[in-house]
Amino acid sequence: PHLIELMDAKLPTRQEQLDSLSTEEFDVLIIGGGATGCGCALDAVSRGLRTALVEKFDFASGTSSRSTKLIHGGVRYLQKAVFNLDIEQYRMVKEALSERANLLQIAPHLSYPLPIMLPIYHLWQLPYFWAGIKMYDLVSGTQILKPSFYLSKSRALEYFPMLQKDALKGALVYYDGQHEDARMCLSIGLTAAKLGASIANYCEVVEILKSTDPTTNKEVVSGARVLDRTTGKEFAIKAKCIVNATGPYSDTIRQKENPQKAKIVAPSAGIHITLPDYYSPERMGLLDPATADGRVIFFLPWQNCTIAGTTDTPCELTDNPHPTEDDVKFILKEIKHYLSPDIDIRRGDVLSAWAGIRPLVTDPNKSDTQSIARNHIIEVSDSRMVTIAGGKWTTYRQMSEETIDKVIEVANLQAKGPCKTKGLLLDGAYHWGPNLFIRLVQEYGVEPSVAQHLANVYGDKSLEIIKLESLSGQRWPVVGKRLHPNYPYLESEVRWATREYACRAVDILARRTRLAFANVHAAVEALPRVVQIMGEELGWSETKRQEELAHCKGFLRFEMGYNLKLQERLQHPINLSSEEIADLMSKFRKMDADNKGFITLNDLERYFKNHAAPMLGTNHSMEAAQIMDMIDEVDLNRNGRIEMSEFLQFMSAAKSGTVGSSRFKHVLDRTSHSDKDHVISVDRSGGGV
């Protein structure tokens, strides 16, 4: 009952959290607001320790929001454990499977079992894969999600009709967990905050503070100097111990504490792409266990789309990891092997692409520092800073438990008992039930798809969010104005997110909603409204609003794959017949009425008024913002107009599939058909006089 009361209480404001951080003294300061950092904060505060956490950017802004979205034990790790008789690998899988069960229990609104198919194209694979999958079930023990099973060829195609059926012998299906990773991480952090932890995003550690321990006369960490990136102000946080849970940035913090420290992190980039939902069934994933270069590719339904990945490429540490065209093409090439030839796998179908940096680590506690640690490592410095690095999303809780155990030991802290996070429900789970979305539909008049989205992301907090929505002005839905017509994210989610510490527009589009990951083009379209709502909630000036627009556009272009299509088009040769070029040049000249050699906003406004309006009807008139978005689709050199070469290049790319669905091409095609439809034939006019 006490926990429920705390979870139902109002969240402290960000300013209240900052005031607490700058005035109180803490038992432990955690640096890093990813899954491990938030997990450490929850573990520490639930044991009664005075807990602080700071994050350089937004919660889950790094690797924790850019995962494959799976909660899994690791089928391939089990394979290595069996074939290499490796007991360490076996224990790692068993631990991960236990943590998988716990995560599905503590956040049932955010996580669920997902069947994953292993298609069989060679008969010898059947006993081999069957033995491995059954061993996976066996290691799960009583915490098994659902038993694996075999499917005949015909049944496999019923479950996954997109499969390549030639040479298909059958399929094996096993179960792992799936979750909304960014919201899961935030929920862990918010749960910690409601239990009393002081947490703040956009607070960067610029210096590790030290003092002399009077009992040992040794120099030990005593806190950190922190920069609030939203205001530019610095302040100090006092703490008896520091936890470095910064993932890929572990060495950066380690060297702030001791510049002589050797690096232990080997950053590796993992790329994922997003494809339309018709590429996969609604509730069935696919595993490619052996790609051309030995990597594993997952092909999974998520957020009403399909995600595919991942790659594994050594990279440099950066605040702005971005996908590469080579990686996108590699993933498309691999999934093509498993999908029916009826499906035209087009580069233009890639809705988003993103990169996450995987922090592979060498163990500084071992003499052989060249070998990558298979599991997480915990390092304690001479000045009592505890670094937790490596591991994976699924095992964040176990990693956090071991870390706080070590913190209590090295700093001689007094905790109220052992770890309490096993089975501890997260914020949003206490009053949630699988039929909560029906209540949203019946009591508030929300669309069923939107209601399911709200209930399955926010849990019982969805009832508070929907109260922020104004009436739609329609008979149905009664409430619920979407940020984008094709996705279930509501305007009220933006207002709610500002109360959950969202500070920038990118926080909304990339993490509080997942629109940037689901469809980067839709995110670009929703951005102005997001900035407008955040401006109202946070009191932004016009200058600040323009800064946010520019910052978020840069993020979407560089980190979410928006610019990749432009780069691909730049390299795409014009492949059109002479007849097609002549026809397109004729269309171009109709739009370029003044024969300038390029098309402007005014040209298209005039053209669409004369051609598109009669075709689409008066209720479908083209607004200037919509036309500018169309120009943006075609405009390669970003000068705000369409030149002849850009027009031909775009139409060629659309023909080849390098460009997917395009509003500009759609409207242009319909106006062209309309022109032909309105030609009066000589026969109908009586042959002339």
Image: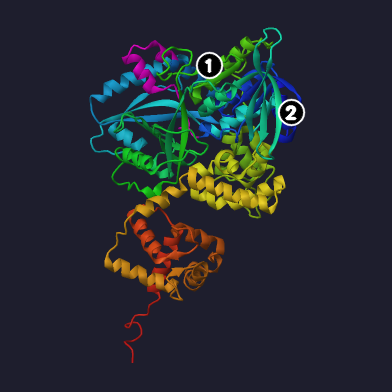
Q: Which residue is mark 1?
A: 378
Which is more N-terminal, label 2 or label 1?
A: 2
Which percent across, then down, holds residue 564? 42, 48
Residue at left 38%, top 54%? Answer: 570
Kindly tell me whether residue 34 is visible in this rendering.
Answer: yes
The stretch in magenta equals 66-91
Type of residue at label 2? Ser
Type of residue at label 1? Ile
Q: Which residue is mark 2?
A: 22
Q: Is residue 472 left or right of residue 117?
A: right
Q: Is residue 468 left or right of residue 356?
A: right
> How is the model colour-coded?
rainbow
- Nearer the observer, 498 or 122: 498
Dot 1 surroundings within 10 Å: few (below 14), some, or many (20 or more)?
A: some
- Nearer the observer, 286 or 161: 286
Residue at left 27%, top 38%? Answer: 165
